[in-house]
Image: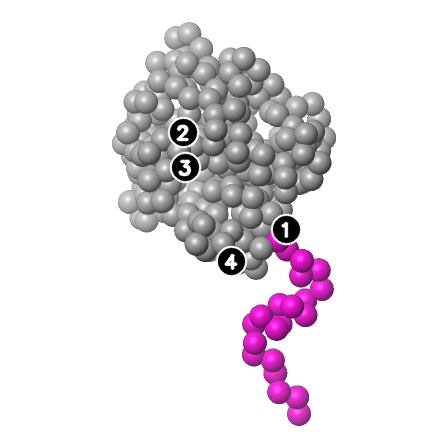
Amino acid sequence: MTTPNLNPSASLSAIPYGTLPTASAPASRKPISLPRLAELHARGEKITMLTAYDATFAAMADSAGVECLLVGDSLGMVCQGLNSTVGVTLETMCYHTESVSRGLRRVQGTAWLIGDLPFGTYQESREQALRSATALLKAGAHMVKLEGGGWTTEVVRFLVERGIPVCAHLGLTPQTVHALGGYRVQGKGDSAATLRQQALALEQAGAAMLVLEMVPAALATELTQELKHCATIGIGAGNGTAGQVLVMHDMLGVNLGKNPKFVRNFMTDTGSVQAAMQAYVQAVKTGQFPDNTLHAW
C-alpha cells in the first residue's frame, strides 16, 4: 500500500506545466483589499487594473504588480469570438472567474479579483442580482461589477447591504451599446449632468469603484474630485481618474480587431508579456498613460 503524499509543495512541483511565475514577495505587497484600495485612493496613488480570463495570465499580471484583475464579459469577444458582450452567460463568467482565482492561488497572488455580472443576470430584480453576484463570489471573485446608472442604484445598495462589494460602470456600457447608438463617447453636452448625478448616486449607494468608459477627460477628472469614497477607474476617460483599466489583449496588441483610440500597445517597446504588463503598471503609476492628447476626448 502506497502512502499518499501530503506535502502540498511536493505535489505542486510534480504537476506538469507548473511553471507559473512567482507572486509578488509578501514583504513588497500586502494582499489587496477594499481598505488597501481605499488607502491608495486617499493618497493619490493610481490604481492599476487589467482584464484576465485564465490562470496563467492572471498569475503573470499579479507578478507584474497589477492591483486589480477584472474577469470582464469582454471575454465574449476576445475569448469566444462573439460580436458583443451580450451573449456571455453567468456560467461562462463563473468558469473564467474560477480559472483566474486558481491561478492566483497557485502563486499565492495578492490581486483584488472583480467579476462582471453579464447581461440579463441583474436586470430582472435585486434578488436576481444577488443570486448572480453570489455565484461569482463562490467562484472566487472579491467584488462584482455591473453596468449603468439610475435603476442600478438600488441594486448596488441591495448588494452592498448584504456584504457584496460593487464596482459600478458608467459612460459607454457595452451591454447596452445598441441603445446608446454604437460605440460613442458618453457624457458630452447636456448628458454630462445626468452622468454626474448617476455617479454621485452610485457612490451614495455604496459602490466602492466606478469604471468610466469613453467619457470626456474633463468630466472624468471632475467626477474623480467630487466622489469622496468611490475610486474612478478610467478607460478612454483621460488621466485624471483614480486608476486605469485596459483589456489585456488590447494592451498586448493581440486582439482580433482594430485597437480603440484609448489603447496603447505595451508590447511594442518591451518584447514580452511580463515586461509589457510591468510597463503598463509603471506608466499608469507615473501618469505617463494615458496621454490625454492621444488616448482621450
Q: Quadrant of residue 261?
A: top right
Residue 220 in view of the camera: yes
Range of residues picked out in magenta: 1-21
Tell me the distance, in whole angstroms, between the alpha carbons under discs 2 and 1: 27 Å
Tell me the distance, in whole angstroms, between the alpha carbons under discs 4 and 3: 24 Å
Labels 3, 1: front one: 1
- Give residue 207's position: percent from left, percent from top: 34, 36
Q: Which residue is mark 3?
A: 167
Mark 3–mark 1 CB contact (< 8 Å): no
Q: Is residue 58 left or right of residue 151?
A: right
Q: Which residue is mark 4?
A: 108
Mark 4–mark 3 CB contact (< 8 Å): no
Mostly what secondary structure, the magenta segment? Answer: loop
Q: Residue at x 57, y 15 (%)?
A: 294
Residue 242 is tagged as 2
User: The disc labelled 1 sits on which kind of residue?
Assistant: Thr
Helix, strand or loop for disc 3? strand
- Is residue 37 highlighted in magenta? no
In the image, 240 versus 255, the foreground residue is 240
Mark 4–mark 1 CB contact (< 8 Å): no
- Give residue 86's position: percent from left, percent from top: 58, 33
Characterize the local packing of mark 3: few (<14), some (14-19) or many (20 or more) Cα atoms within 10 angstroms: many
Q: Which residue is mark 1?
A: 56
User: The disc labelled 4 sits on which kind of residue?
Assistant: Gln
- Among the two numbered marks 4 and 1 on one chain, the one whose residue lies closer to the N terminus: 1
In the image, 97 versus 39, the foreground residue is 39
Helix, strand or loop for disc 1? helix
Q: Residue at x 67, y 58 (%)?
A: 19
Q: Is residue 179 left or right of residue 203?
A: right
